[in-house]
Image: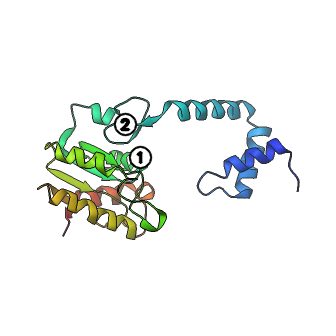
């Protein structure tokens, strides 16, 4: 079936979202245009504002609309504990499911040489600068329990070890091959409280 160019452009744009295929994009497009044109305009404005106004925190790489995110700016959080995660969604998952009161560092991915993702792409120089500052006593490795996440955790553990910083790994109550943002709060809380030293 032939769609008008503007409709096809909308459907193609929606397909950039994870899990959205041709049928889902078609359904969303029709819903927005037929039933919710005001919501579609509000969505477009909110998306444009977020794309132009949201950036990465200069300290932890979390998404924020300020230079330093609220977590890094907080004086109530423990500066000696640093939790390293793969994505901003992981920060929200941990913060809402656990009582963790430290700071974070967001890698924005994991080591994957086959995909051209090495230490430079993960901001590890920035992480090393934080470790070298001398405030951190424990680095909690909360990368996903995938092959790449485990390799990343071992690499990061070595960065901590050579600086005399304790490196711990969250316990594997999280299913192997899973991603933190999809794990239920109880499992994530149990895994986080049962973290262990990286061997």
Q: Position of residue 52 (x, y in %)?
A: 54, 31
Q: Quadrant of the N terminus?
A: bottom right
Which residue appears at 31% of the width and 36% of the height? 71
* Colouring style: rainbow
Q: Position of residue 146 (x, y in %)?
A: 39, 68
Q: Does the image show residue 195?
A: no
Query: Viewer-nearest of labels 1 and 2?
Result: 2
Which residue appears at 75% of the width and 33% of the height? 37
Whichever of labels 1 and 2 marks the residue nearer the N terminus, that label is 2
Q: Image height check: is 162 above or below 34?
A: below
Secondary structure state at the residue bearing disc 1: helix
Of 187 and 118, nearer the camera is 118
Number of numbered discs: 2
Dot 1 alpha-carbon crowd within 10 angstroms: few under 14, some 14 to 19, many 20 or more:
many
Which residue appears at 67% of the width and 52% of the height? 15
Residue 11's label in the rendered image is none
Q: Quadrant of the C terminus?
A: bottom left
Residue 143: quadrant of the picture:
bottom left
Q: Position of residue 86 (x, y in %)?
A: 38, 54
Q: Which residue is mark 2?
A: 57
Outermost residue toward the left in this view:
164
Residue 126: quadrant of the picture:
top left
Q: Position of residue 31 (x, y in %)?
A: 75, 43
Q: Which residue is mark 1?
A: 88
Which residue appears at 67% of the width and 48% of the height? 14
Does 59 sit left or right of 117 as displayed?
left
Dot 2 alpha-carbon crowd within 10 angstroms: few under 14, some 14 to 19, many 20 or more:
many
Q: Does the image show residue 45?
A: yes
């Amino acid at each position: 079936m032939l769609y008008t160019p503007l409709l096809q452009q909308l459907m193609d744009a929606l397909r950039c979202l994870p899990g959205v295929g041709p049928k889902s994009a078609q359904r969303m497009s029709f819903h927005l245009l037929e039933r919710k044109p005001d919501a579609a305009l509000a969505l477009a404005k909110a998306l444009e504002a977020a794309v132009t106004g949201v950036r990465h925190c200069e300290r932890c790489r979390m998404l924020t609309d300020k230079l330093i995110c609220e977590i890094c700016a907080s004086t109530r959080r423990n500066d000696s504990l640093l939790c390293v995660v793969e994505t901003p969604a992981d920060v929200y998952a941990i913060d809402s499911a656990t009582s963790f009161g430290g700071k974070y560092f967001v890698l924005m991915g994991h080591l994957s040489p086959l995909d051209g993702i090495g230490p430079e792409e993960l901001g590890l120089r920035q992480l090393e600068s934080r470790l070298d500052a001398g405030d951190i006593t424990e680095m909690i490795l909360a990368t996903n329990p995938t092959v790449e996440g485990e390799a990343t955790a071992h690499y990061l553990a070595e960065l901590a070890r050579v600086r005399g910083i304790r490196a711990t790994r969250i316990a594997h109550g999280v299913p192997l091959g899973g991603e933190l943002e999809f794990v239920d709060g109880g499992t994530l809380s149990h895994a986080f409280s049962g973290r262990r030293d990286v061997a």
